[in-house]
Amino acid sequence: HPWGFTFFPKKFSQFMRMAVWGAINEREKSGFKRHDLIDLLTELKNAEFDDSHNNIFEFKGDNIVAQAAVFFAAGFETSSTTISFSLYELSLKPEVQRRVRKEIIDAVEGNHGEITYDMIMRLPYLDMVVSETLRKYPPLPLLDRIADADYAVPGTDLIIEKGTPVYITLTGLHYDPKYHKDPEIFDPERFSEINKEATKQTWYPFGDGPHVCIGQRLGLAQSKLGLIELLRRYEFSPSDRTPIPMVLNKKGVMTSAEGGLYLHVKKLDPQNN
């Protein structure tokens, strides 16, 4: 990245190159079609764009690998990050942890022990916990867009010209006390039925508009499912290595804890739940 940021460790980047190019080469040799991501990347690699496409992006080399890597990150890394930060905050707020655990256990028992998508989406307090986690720790701290037309910023003489990259800081927005009182405090009640209307225009962990994250529903479902499985079986509390207060890694593209996250994990007695 021109700013010095890295999305993946070097070892993982090398693995992705080998995996993606190996799959593309094998697919081209065999001629087999599965109508999947590898087929799409193969078509893009071999496509010839004429001037009518106004193409400014070349699908070659690491640009091909990056398309697969982004799908991997969007489908895995964002959910695991949200789960990790949720457990961190819940370890510091045992009363919140107990409340969300009770909601989870009651729902699972009321659904005959089955965990279904509908059940996951009918857990209001879990949704509040995840929403507040995403406010404090949006997986991507920036939204990036490209202006598709000239735009005059109201109240100024500034013109954002068509084609200009625009970067919006989510951490700045999510931590602005003008919109979120005591922003450093983890408070799921911000997203209760009574309060959540006030956060609609100031909470964008998945972006918004026509380019909103296409994996929003999947990401939320994965994060909630992970928390359901963990919280119904384990209790989380700070350990000697738990960072208090949280220190975020300033060099990564994605939001992550400096030095990692460490918690004390205790298996729950099913009889006492």
Image (cartoon, grey):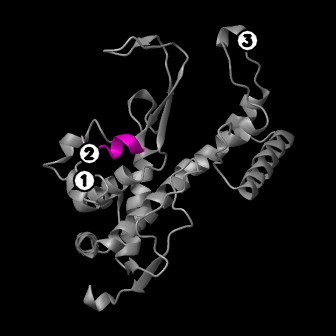
Q: Which residue is drawn at 42% across and 27% down?
A: 210
Q: What segment carries the magenta color?
A: 171-177
- Image quarter where the C terminus lies is bottom left
Amino acid type at image mark 1 = Asp
Q: What element carries label 1?
A: loop
Structural distance between the alpha carbons of marks 3 and 1: 53 Å
In front here: 65 or 48? 65
Pointers 1 and 2 in contact (C-beta within 8 Å): yes
Amino acid type at image mark 2 = Pro
Amino acid type at image mark 3 = Asp
The residue indicated by pointer 1 is: 182
Whichever of labels 3 and 2 marks the residue nearer the N terminus, that label is: 3
In this view, the residue farthest toward the top is 52
Q: Residue at x 66, y 13 (%)?
A: 53
Q: Where is residue 87 in the image (x, y as percent from the top left)?
A: 39, 69
Whichever of labels 1 and 2 marks the residue nearer the N terminus, that label is: 2
- How packed is label 3: few (under 14 Cα within 10 Å), some, or many (20 or more)? few
Structural distance between the alpha carbons of marks 3 and 2: 50 Å
Q: Is mark 3 on a helix, strand or loop?
A: loop
Q: In this view, does 197 lie above or below 128?
A: above
Q: What element carries label 2?
A: loop
Number of the label disc, if any, that sits on residue 50: 3
The residue indicated by pointer 2 is: 177
Q: Is residue 196 above or below residue 242?
A: above
